[in-house]
Amino acid sequence: MATIDEIQAEIVEDFSFLPEWDERYAYLIELGQKMPPLPEEYRTEDNIVRGCQSTVWLHRECQDGKVLLQADSDSLIVKGLAALLMQIYSGQPAEDILKADLSFLEGTGLSKHLSSQRANGLMAMIDEIKAYCVKCAAGEI
């Protein structure tokens, strides 16, 4: 499995082929549409990410110190952002996720082009994932 840094480098490269922001948003939407559907049993109140204006469900599992993630959203762009996070984090060791620097945000330009509401939602998802990783790494779950 590729490392978090390797996956982020691939994402930055993929975005570099799309010079216009309309194309980048379309690509984000496409990524979200390609995510496997979140099973209905994971669409619970406990899995809703607080701090997102859109509804985002984030299902987390800790297996042998690795974090497995699934997500969905009712917003196309936010679902695409969740797809990027799933691509980067899911299947990675919790400790690696906690140490990871999210360089793809700068590398893709997303840090400058997301609305404040979407950026807040993205950060809320990252915070939820990292809070879960703390428990997974500590063997609490």
Image (cartoon, rainbow, N blue to C red):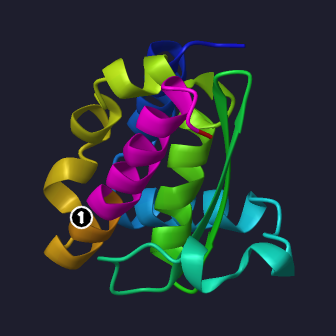
Q: Quadrant of the N terminus?
A: top right
Q: Residue at x 27, y 51 (%)?
A: 110
Q: Looking at the picture, how far across and down is residue 125, in whole percent? A: 40, 59
Viewer-nearest residue: 95 or 103: 95
Under mark 1, the amino acid is Ala
Q: Looking at the picture, how far across and down is residue 75, in whole percent? A: 51, 83
- Per the image, the residue denoted by label 1 is 119
Q: Residue at x 32, y 63 (%)?
A: 124
Label 1 residue SS: helix
Residue lying furthest front: 140
Q: How many marks?
A: 1
Q: Looking at the picture, how far across and down is residue 13, in whole percent? A: 46, 26
- Is 13 positioned to the left or the right of 7 in the image? left
Q: Decide: few, some or many residues near mark 1? Use Cα within 10 Å; few <14, some 14-19, many ≥20.
A: some
Please say if 95 is above or below 127.
Answer: above
Viewer-nearest residue: 70 or 6: 70
Q: Residue at x 28, y 57 (%)?
A: 123
Q: Is residue 100 visible in the rendered structure shown here?
A: no
Specify the segment rendered in magenta: 123-140
Please say if 17 is above or below 41.
Answer: above
Please say if 51 is above or below 95.
Answer: below
Q: Looking at the picture, how far across and down is residue 49, in whole percent? A: 44, 72
Q: Residue at x 57, y 86 (%)?
A: 74
